Image (cartoon, coloured by chain):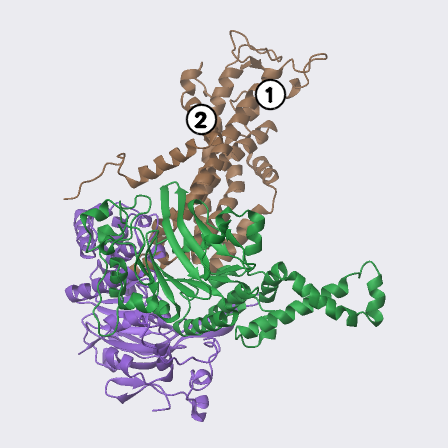
Chain colours: A green, B purple, C brown
């Protein structure tokens, strides 16, 4: 039984995850023994740049690793709303269908790529609702049905052509109402009109709200957000971040928020995980990570952000080629504190002080 | 200090076509009366959100687009005064065409946002960087090769990179190739259109350092367009803020970021997430969405979303005026 | 001091690409089959004068005859593949037929492509009125069924291999124009084309140096698939009697010669099988070889386009 793998307050644990991509240029070792854990109701910020493996990890949590990627090791333990703990990587398709969209939802960077341009926004939200909350909707229909079956409709209902049409009509109404409520929750103005709008008729910020609406339509326990505000204007980003935080408090969702923007991290995460070249190199509460970054990469990252009055320093070198990553610690070629050991051995993620984990030989990690 | 570029009431509209024979249904007033002066040797920042017209303004200034009205004075030697009178007519490039326009191109260049799409994927690096030399008949053959290598080294690349295709490089390196291409003819004025947005966070700093270094060594004047205010603050001396096709505020960088006057600028700056969990910024959350540039509001374009809106704002458009030394705002509050 | 890399050295990036394509072909058995067939026919066409030396001073494409009897003779020691009606040597015919097939196929595809590039390129680059006019012209030709239109042209020009070539070119170029126009529209919207304008490149330079090389791959795929189609259509026209004169080494024409003998003799319907099956096999293999090669190229080049 998997009951012992997750602590009482843990929602998700990624353990020693290995994901490799088989391309014609070679085997890309995208994620190499990554470890993450998420507590119930918290927002975990995941920081990383190109090649860090953060997006691949997020997709793998939903067992949606893009081809030609293959999961080659590790576990992803998830506590379902029923209380049951499952290893996502061992589930078959039918088990996954119960989880995706319902218990784990994901929102992406490009809202207009996530929305189908041929269907109205209402149709797309309805799809999420009907897929996962059909019994609940039918129950509402059942309650209304009695009243409706009167007069002309009662007669038509008996004919084979119209049979069930009342039910369908009522279902549409019930779902539509639900959608409008959801849009109001997303603070979308004029929701009645928006329900029938097509994605291209809405602005980027609105589209992203719709995507969030779809993701939250079934009150998931875990929300994966992969840079959802990176492409939005600063003022719109502020609105969306605000919205996500309020919704999170309302629904009690746990959130994994992926971004490269340290400012966003500072604002919304409770804890932060820093990823570099496929590994998690540091995890700590937000305050701690900014006050006392331990891993040289985290430090260099913070120093490279131009800030008013402060000088900024670039990190020398480039992100490594993951087909032929550096031996040992993957950051050692660019690290100003690199020791001889760093090129030979790979440091493990180790808890140095309360809640603060680092994978670096400067701080234990032996 | 004299200017390299002075624009006077620059306008660029894009027609909206629709219907059976693509009739003109309306216009997107992307740039609607922009007057700026960019001084020699400075880095002038142009900020705003999507749809404000900053990229269109940048491309129009270097005549990649043809303005619908207004004048653009360009003097590579930087001898223009702030308000060029008709004496400077010969410097007006707004209506230039053909060969005369082409000969100007070696003096003004642009670096695009996304180096993955701004470099021809089927051309070798050496050909990409050498092309301006051929086009402007500056030199060929061995001489050109020498200059290309020299330029690549200046941007931090080396000889081994010459015979490769762009896709073999990282984002930061590709952008350096794009910079080399832009600077190989030693232009005096360069438009940098969001040059760090498509690049990793840790690499942005090195690109900014490169820009500064090249500016010093080659005597360049930059127009730095960005929506990333922290980038702008780091390297710009003066900054202009645009909203819906108009300039709403211009000031020196330090002054602007410390004491923004226009309500939009204030809201914009307050929305930037600070990488410091201790400071909780008081956020001014704007109402509603940015309106469409095809149908701008009457009077002051910001009035539907402005927290300090007054009656006059709805009917009369505020003019850009100097309300503090070297600090211009277009707002009825002042 | 920079060294000049030789064209054929392993360092040249374009050679590296070619090697990559060839290597990728190894992974699919059908592509190897296609490539082998194409190579086989290429060698056949090149070595035609060696494998089947011309016997007279006249046009080498005319098959030598060993008599004048109308009945085809089966393969023998004298005529390896036998003879067809009029005692033309089939062996000679099918080998020189490979050359003829290449002549027509390559010529039609090459010229159609060039016309298509000019028309489609101008339309896709300049858009607007030029695009409308050129595309309507293209549409007019595409409105007619290809074979019928080709036949009409040939009848107007007079029969002969050159007429077929010309007719096929006129029928084939519109599809290239369409393809190239679409590709030009796509590529001119890319940033690097605007960047080239910013550098100061002339329109012509942009079209040839920047846009065209980025449209090459779909063209290569279309061309290789087309060589088979063109050859088949040319053979059909020859079979109908509109092409080469009797006795010419053209597969379609050779099959045409066997028209009276397809039914064989009563009691043995395949008595004269060699007269039509042998040239038929050659034609079939040629077309399928090029089709397989074209498919393989499409599978390889398409991800390469996307990879960029």
Q: Secondary structure at mark 2?
A: helix
Say few, some or many: other residues with alpha carbon within 10 Å of mark 1 (under 14 / 14 to 19 / 20 or more). many
| Viewport quadrant of the N terminus of chain C | top left
Q: Nearer the viewer, residue A107 or B255?
A: A107
Q: Which residue does the numbered mark 2 point to in the structure image?
A: C36
Q: Nearer the viewer, residue A231 or A50?
A: A50
Q: Check the image and report above or below for A134 versus A22.
A: below
Q: Which residue does the numbered mark 1 point to in the structure image?
A: C257
- Mark in front: 2 vs 1: 2
Residue A361 shown left or right of residue B281 in the figure: left
The image shows residue C208 at horizontal and vertical percentages of 36, 49
Residue at left offset 43%, top offset 55%: A13
Q: Is residue B292 visible?
A: yes
Residue A149 shown left or right of residue C197 in the figure: right
Asked where in the image residue A102 lies, by quadrant, the reply is: bottom right
- Tell me which label, 2 or 1, sits earlier in the chain: 2
Residue sitting at the far top: C77
The chain that hosts pointer 1 is: C
The image shows residue A119 at horizontal and vertical percentages of 59, 62
Q: Check the image and report above or below for C100 versus A90.
A: above
Q: Are marks 2 and 1 on the same chain?
A: yes
Q: Secondary structure at mark 1?
A: helix
The image shows residue A356 at horizontal and vertical percentages of 31, 61
Q: Is residue B134 visible?
A: no
The image shows residue B25 at horizontal and vertical percentages of 52, 73
């Amino acid at each position: 039984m998997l009951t012992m793998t997750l602590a009482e307050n843990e929602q998700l644990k990624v353990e020693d995850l290995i994901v490799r991509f088989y391309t014609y240029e070679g085997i890309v070792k995208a994620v190499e023994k990554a470890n993450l854990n998420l507590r119930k109701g918290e927002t975990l910020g995941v920081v990383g740049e190109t090649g860090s493996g953060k997006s691949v990890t997020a997709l793998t949590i939903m067992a949606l690793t893009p081809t030609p990627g293959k999961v080659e090791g590790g576990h992803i333990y998830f506590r379902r709303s029923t209380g049951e703990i499952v290893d996502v990587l061992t589930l078959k398709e039918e088990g996954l269908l119960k989880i995706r969209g319902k218990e784990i939802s994901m929102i992406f960077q490009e809202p207009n790529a996530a929305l189908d341009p041929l269907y109205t926004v209402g149709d797309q939200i309805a799809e999420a609702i009907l897929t996962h909350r059909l019994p609940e909707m039918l129950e509402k229909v059942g309650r209304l049905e009695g009243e409706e079956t009167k007069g002309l409709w009662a007669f038509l209902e008996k004919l084979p052509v119209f049979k069930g049409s009342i039910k369908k009509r009522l279902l549409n109404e019930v779902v539509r109402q639900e959608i409008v409520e959801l849009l109001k929750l997303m603070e979308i103005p004029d929701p009645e009109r928006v329900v029938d709008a097509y994605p291209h008729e809405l602005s980027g910020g609105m589209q992203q709200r719709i995507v969030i609406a779809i993701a939250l339509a079934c009150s998931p326990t875990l929300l994966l957000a992969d840079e959802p505000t990176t492409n939005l204007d600063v003022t719109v980003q502020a609105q969306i971040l605000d919205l996500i935080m309020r919704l999170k408090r309302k629904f009690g969702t746990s959130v994994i928020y992926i971004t490269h923007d340290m400012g966003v991290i500072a604002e919304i995460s409770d804890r932060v995980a820093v990823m570099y070249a496929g590994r998690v190199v540091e995890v700590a509460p937000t305050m701690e990570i900014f006050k006392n970054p331990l891993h040289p990469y985290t430090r260099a990252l913070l120093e490279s952000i131009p800030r008013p009055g402060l000088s900024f320093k670039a990190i020398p070198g480039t992100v490594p080629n993951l087909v032929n990553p550096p031996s040992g610690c993957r950051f050692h070629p660019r690290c100003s504190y690199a020791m001889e050991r760093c090129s030979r051995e790979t440091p493990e993620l180790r808890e140095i002080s309360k809640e603060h984990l680092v994978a670096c030989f400067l701080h234990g990690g032996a | 200090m004299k200017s390299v570029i002075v624009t006077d009431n620059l306008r660029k509209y894009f027609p909206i076509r629709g219907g059976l024979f693509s009739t003109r249904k309306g216009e997107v007033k992307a740039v609607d009366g922009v007057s700026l002066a960019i001084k020699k040797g400075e880095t002038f920042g142009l900020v705003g959100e999507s749809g404000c017209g900053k990229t269109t303004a940048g491309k129009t200034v270097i005549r990649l687009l043809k303005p619908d009205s207004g004048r653009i004075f360009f003097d590579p030697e930087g001898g223009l005064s702030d308000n060029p009178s008709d004496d400077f007519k010969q410097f007006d490039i707004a209506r230039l065409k053909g060969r005369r326009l082409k000969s100007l191109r070696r003096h003004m260049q642009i670096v695009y946002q996304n180096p993955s799409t701004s470099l021809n994927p089927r051309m070798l690096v050496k050909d990409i960087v050498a092309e301006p030399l051929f086009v402007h008949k500056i030199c060929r053959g061995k001489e050109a090769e020498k200059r290309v290598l020299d330029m690549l080294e200046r941007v931090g690349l080396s000889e081994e990179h010459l015979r490769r295709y762009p896709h073999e490089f990282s984002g930061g390196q590709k952008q350096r190739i794009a910079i080399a291409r832009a600077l190989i003819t030693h232009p005096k004025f360069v438009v940098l259109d969001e040059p760090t947005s498509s690049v990793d966070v840790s690499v942005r700093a090195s690109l900014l350092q490169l820009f500064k270094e090249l500016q010093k060594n080659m005597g360049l004047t930059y127009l730095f367009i960005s929506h990333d205010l922290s980038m702008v603050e780091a390297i710009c001396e003066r900054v202009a803020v645009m909203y819906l096709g108009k300039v709403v505020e211009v000031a020196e960088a330090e002054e602007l970021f410390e004491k923004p006057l226009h309500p939009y600028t204030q809201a914009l700056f307050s929305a930037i997430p600070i990488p410091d969990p201790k400071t909780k910024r008081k956020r001014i959350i704007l109402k509603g969405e940015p309106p469409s540039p095809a149908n701008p509001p009457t009077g002051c374009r910001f009035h539907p979303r402005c927290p300090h809106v007054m009656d006059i704002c709805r009917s009369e458009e505020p003019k850009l005026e100097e309300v503090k030394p070297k600090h211009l705002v277009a707002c009825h509050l002042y | 001091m920079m060294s000049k890399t030789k064209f054929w050295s392993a360092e040249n990036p374009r050679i590296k690409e070619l090697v990559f394509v060839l290597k990728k072909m190894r992974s699919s058995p059908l592509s190897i089959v296609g490539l082998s067939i194409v190579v086989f026919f290429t060698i056949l066409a090149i070595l035609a004068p060696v494998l089947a030396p011309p016997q007279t001073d006249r046009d080498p494409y005319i098959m030598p005859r060993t008599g004048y009897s109308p009945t085809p003779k089966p393969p023998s020691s004298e005529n390896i593949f036998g003879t067809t009606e009029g005692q033309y040597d089939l062996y000679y015919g099918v080998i020189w037929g490979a050359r003829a097939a290449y002549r027509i196929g390559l010529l039609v595809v090459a010229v159609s492509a060039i016309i298509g590039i000019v028309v489609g390129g101008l339309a896709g680059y300049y858009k607007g009125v030029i695009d409308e006019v050129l595309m309507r012209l293209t549409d007019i030709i595409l409105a007619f069924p290809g074979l019928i239109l080709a036949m009409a042209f040939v009848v107007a020009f007079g029969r002969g291999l050159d007429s077929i070539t010309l007719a096929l070119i006129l029928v084939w170029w519109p599809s290239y124009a369409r393809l190239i126009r679409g590709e030009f529209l796509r590529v001119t919207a890319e940033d690097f084309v605007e960047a080239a304008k910013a550098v100061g490149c002339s329109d012509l330079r942009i079209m040839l140096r920047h846009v065209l090389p980025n449209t090459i791959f779909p063209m290569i795929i279309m061309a290789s698939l087309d060589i088979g189609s063109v050859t088949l259509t040319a053979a059909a026209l020859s079979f109908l009697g509109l092409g080469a004169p009797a006795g010419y080494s053209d597969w379609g024409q050779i099959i045409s010669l066997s028209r009276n003998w397809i039914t064989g003799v009563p009691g043995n319907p395949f008595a004269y099988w060699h007269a039509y099956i042998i040239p038929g096999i050659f034609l079939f293999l040629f077309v399928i070889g090029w089709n397989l090669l074209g498919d393989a190229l499409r599978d390889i080049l398409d991800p390469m386009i996307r990879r960029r």
